[in-house]
Amino acid sequence: MRIKILIIGLIAMTFQLNAMDENGVKSYMKKYIETKLKSPVKKIDVISSYSLDKLPGWEIYFLAMKVKVKMGNDYREAIVPQTVFTKGDKITLKLMSRKGEDYAKLLKPKVPNRAYDDAHFILGSKDAPHKILVFSDPFCYFCQEKIPEIINLVKANPRTYGLYYYHLPLLNIHPAADVTTKAMHIFQKRGEIDKMFALYDLFIEPTETNTHKILKAIKDKTGVMLSKAEIENEEIKDALRTDMAMKRKLMVTGTPTIFFDGKWDKSRKAYKQYAQ
């Protein structure tokens, strides 16, 4: 976080440039950071970019910058996410709306098509005209309200929506989400979606760390006793790593985070507009 603050503090203003494309943005950011911070930039990836509908001529770029920053006598490598705006010959890290809102906080990358895969599809229709993609933690209070609402909406409108689910256990505040999320993934893979979502109402403290107690609570809720070996399966760990990678790609920071038709649904309400 300190690294990002340093970068923003240095270049949160508009510079005159030649009109640029994706490569121009990467080249300029690399040169500027290395010149001003004296920190080598090993790589810059463009996660996503698109035109801003409400601001003609403006483009937004979501970057992941691999930067080596000096900490004491050593250099520490860090991946720094950064949002950049361009218009013709201008570039800026801070673009404000007329209401004084920072567009960098209002927008996220668009969902890549590969995120809508069979492994994450859970309800509705894969061919539906509208897609809902969620990141959730079963112990998140707001998830416990919002996710059942979304599930019921998709069940009632299966031809209108396709629902895709990504696990995002917030282990620093909900340690019990580790085992619970792995169990959810097992039920998800088996196609036992009702059992998967029954774990949103698990009778156990979110701070519980005893694996046996959590598995017992899962059995009490679903009638299925999973073993420790099942939840520690490498395939499950790989699947959850995939979810974490998508979380980073889409710059997701909390739960529930909802994307509707590829765009971040900040209001968590936009997906409702096509429900019958």
Image: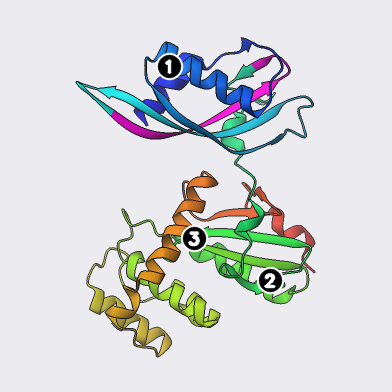
Q: Assign a secondary structure to mark 2.
A: helix
Give how far across and how far down residue 202 sits, in percent.
39, 75
Residue type at mark 1: give it: Glu
Q: Earlier in the sequence, mark 2 or mark 3?
A: 3
Q: Tell me if 26 is positioned left or right of 269 in this view.
A: left
| Colour mapping used in the image | rainbow
Q: How far apart are labels 2 and 1 at the CA level?
A: 49 Å
Residue range highlighted in magenta: 76-90
- Mark whose residue sits in front, 2 or 1: 1
Residue type at mark 2: give it: Val
Q: Which mark is residue 154?
A: 2
Task: State whether the magenta stretch is mostly helix, strand or loop.
Answer: strand
Residue annotated with mark 3: 136
Most distant residue in the bottom direction? 223
Q: Is residue 3 above or below residue 188?
A: above
At a point 72% along the width and 25% down the height, the residue shown is 58
Regarding residue 95, the answer to whether it shows in the image is: no
Structural crowding at the residue carrying mark 2, measured as other residues with C-alpha within 10 Å and reported as few (<14), some (14–19) or many (≥20): many
Regarding residue 126, the answer to whether it shows in the image is: yes
Q: Assign a secondary structure to mark 1.
A: helix
Most distant residue in the left direction? 73
Q: How far apart are labels 3 and 1 at the CA level?
A: 37 Å
Give how far across and how far down residue 177 sits, in percent.
36, 65
87 within the magenta span: yes
At a point 58% along the width and 22% down the height, the residue shown is 94
Residue annotated with mark 1: 34
Q: Are marks 3 and 1 in contact (CB under 8 Å)?
A: no
